[in-house]
Image (spheres, rainbow, N blue to C red):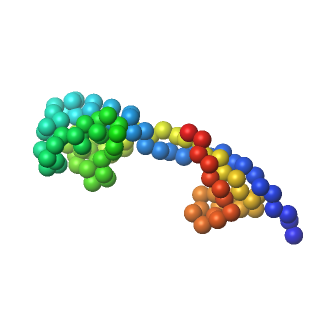
Amino acid sequence: MEKNHMRTVTIQRPVVDLKATGVQIKSLRIKSGYTVHDIQAVFGFEYPQAVYAWECGKSIPTIDNLLVLAHLFDVSVEEIVIQRMIEIEVSCVSNKIEKLCNKNCNDCKLRLSA
């Protein structure tokens, strides 16, 4: 039987860039002619802080809210959400490498290196 050896593989993984997405939301809002208070009213928020938090990259709209923003700005959700790639180093038993993307690969250990 073949002896198992640990190997490290670096893979790329997309993540949401909160700051860039916030800048994009603000840019699309302005381009579409909406004020922060207009967006606040559309969502029925009592205060505009949620909209400001999106635009500052402190939080991201829910998927439902992203769909509404996409409709308001006449763009796709993909045009609102900005992503960037991070590298993940994965140490895994060599005969398990094929399962790196499988959630059930219990032999794998992930380490982020953003």
Q: Give above or below for 84 relative to 66.
A: above
| Left or right: 21, with 71 as reference point | right
Tell me the residue at 50%/45% (across/down): 14
Image spot of residue 82 (x, y percent): 40, 39
Tell me the residue at 30%/51% (across/down): 62
Front residue of 95/46: it is 46
Tell me the residue at 64%/64% (across/down): 105
Front residue of 74/35: it is 35
Q: Give above or below for 22 relative to 66.
A: above
Q: Give above or below for 29 relative to 95.
A: above
Front residue of 101/19: it is 19
Q: Give above or below for 32 relative to 109.
A: above
Image spot of residue 41 (x, y percent): 12, 44
Q: Is residue 79 visible?
A: no
Q: State which quadrant residue 24 falls in.
A: top left
Q: Quadrant of the N terminus?
A: bottom right
Tell me the residue at 33%/45% (across/down): 60
Q: Is residue 93 visible?
A: yes
Q: State which quadrant residue 104 falls in.
A: bottom right
Image spot of residue 33 (x, y percent): 16, 31
Numbered circles on residues, count: 0
Q: Quadrant of the C terminus?
A: top right
Image spot of residue 111 (x, y percent): 62, 48
